[in-house]
Image (cartoon, rainbow, N blue to C red):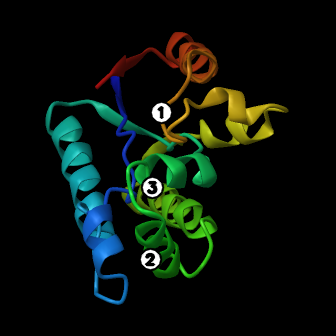
Amino acid sequence: MDKTLIIQPESGLQYNWQEIAANPSGQHVPVMDLVAYKAQYTNRIAQARAHGQEPVLVSLPIMDENRYFAFITRGMSMQERKNLLYWLGGKTERLRNIHALYNLSLFRLAAQQCVHIIDITSPMLASAHYEQLLEQDGVTLSPEGKQLVDNELSTLISRFGLLAS
């Protein structure tokens, strides 16, 4: 049976940041909440299986919460930045925690759906200079990051005959 990689680089870090900065005490949900995120993956797994292919998930790449905070607050006033940090509980680490929550949900979903998952997160975290694997926005892979992921995936593609999806 052919295998199909299911890759979705987004996590739950897409919010209306301007809205949060304007009303940090309000209730705010990500553009794609965890339920919708898992449903999207579940649908893609079902589609692959319906086409007679074995789905293989790919974990999320790492992120740098401080760079990402700087990126999402560019152009904001100092007060808006403070408001956003207040909403985050006073720590940019919450951004990394949200990202980790979505990544961990992929591992749980893989176990629930009995599909393999390729862990690209661990080799990135193990890199001595992981910050070089990301662009200035803190979430986009740099050329070095893309090369590391490509190397990981190429090894598995050649070993197991995976097809990209």
Q: Which residue is mark 1?
A: 140
In the drawing, does residue 51 fall left or right of residue 97?
A: left
In the drawing, does residue 57 fall left or right of residue 126?
A: left
Q: Residue at 43% across / 55% down in the picture? A: 73
Q: Residues within 10 Å of mark 1 (few under 14, many from 20)?
A: some
3D distance between C-alphas at marks 2 and 3? 31 Å
Q: Residue furthest top?
A: 158
Picture quarter containing residue 9?
A: top left
Q: How many marks?
A: 3
Q: Of marks 1 and 3, which one's residue comes earlier in the chain?
A: 3
Q: Which residue is mark 2?
A: 83
Q: Of marks 2 and 1, which one's residue comes earlier in the chain?
A: 2
Q: Amino acid at mark 1?
A: Thr
Residue 64 to residue 149: above or below: below
Q: Which residue is mark 3?
A: 106
Q: Are marks 2 and 1 in contact (CB under 8 Å)?
A: no
Q: Are marks 1 and 3 in contact (CB under 8 Å)?
A: no
Q: Residue at 56% across / 15% down in the picture? A: 143
Q: Amino acid at mark 2?
A: Asn
